[in-house]
C-alpha cells in the first residue's frame, strides 16, 4: 500500500481536462473528487454525486476508501466521469 504524500493525476476525459495534485495517501477517494471537480469543470456549482471515479478502468464503488486502500501509487491516475444513460448512478431505493 502507498504511504505518505502522493503526486497523482485526476482527469475528466470526457472534457479532455486533467490536473495534478499532491495529497496524503490516507485521503478518501470522495474527498479527492470533491477537491478536483471545481478546477476541472471551472465552476463551484457542482454535485459530486453526479460523477463517479475510475481507477484502472474500474469504477470505485466505495468512495470512502482511501487512496492507500485502493493501492494508488505515486503518479497514479484517477478518472472522473459523469453518470449518464450508458452508466447510470447506483440505485438507492
Image (spheres, helix red, strand yellow):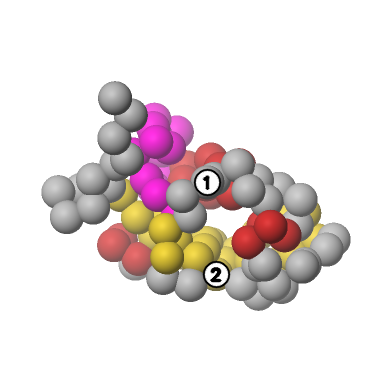
Query: x and y percent of residue 8 in the render?
Result: 64, 66
Residue 9 visible to the viewer: yes
Q: Residue at x 30, y 61 (%)?
A: 15
Residue 74 covered by magenta stretch: no
Residue 89 placement, left or right of 64: left
Q: Residue at x 40, y 49 (%)?
A: 52
Neighbour tally class for label 1: few under 14, some 14-19, many 20 plus, Cα within 10 Å: few
Q: Which stretch did the figure color magenta?
A: 39-53
Tell which of 59 and 44 is nearer to you.
59
| Quarter where residue 68 is shown | bottom right
Residue 40 covered by magenta stretch: yes
Neighbour tally class for label 2: few under 14, some 14-19, many 20 plus, Cα within 10 Å: some
Query: x and y percent of residue 38 in the render?
Result: 47, 42
Vertical order, 78 against 32 (above or below): below
In the current view of this chain or complex, which residue is farthest to the right?
4
Q: Residue at x 65, y 74 (%)?
A: 75
Vertical order, 51 against 16 (above or below): above
Does label 2 or label 1 sit earlier along the sequence?
1
Residue 21 placement, left or right of 19: right
Residue 43 placement, left or right of 65: left
Residue 91 placement, left or right of 71: left
Query: x and y percent of residue 61 in the render?
Result: 46, 50
Q: Residue at x 77, y 68 (%)?
A: 1
Residue beneath disc 2? 77
Residue beneath disc 1? 62
Q: Secondary structure at mark 1?
A: loop
Measure how far apart labels 2 and 1 are at the Cα level. 17 Å
Amino acid at each position: 500500500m502507498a504511504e505518505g504524500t502522493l503526486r497523482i493525476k485526476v482527469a475528466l476525459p470526457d472534457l479532455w481536462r486533467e490536473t495534478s495534485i499532491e495529497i496524503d495517501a490516507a485521503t478518501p477517494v470522495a474527498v479527492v473528487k470533491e477537491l478536483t471537480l471545481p478546477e476541472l469543470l471551472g465552476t463551484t456549482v457542482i454535485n459530486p454525486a453526479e460523477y463517479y471515479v475510475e481507477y484502472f478502468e474500474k469504477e470505485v464503488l466505495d468512495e470512502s476508501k482511501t487512496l492507500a486502500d485502493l493501492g494508488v501509487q505515486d503518479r497514479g491516475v484517477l478518472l472522473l466521469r459523469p453518470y449518464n444513460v450508458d452508466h447510470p448512478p447506483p440505485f438507492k431505493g
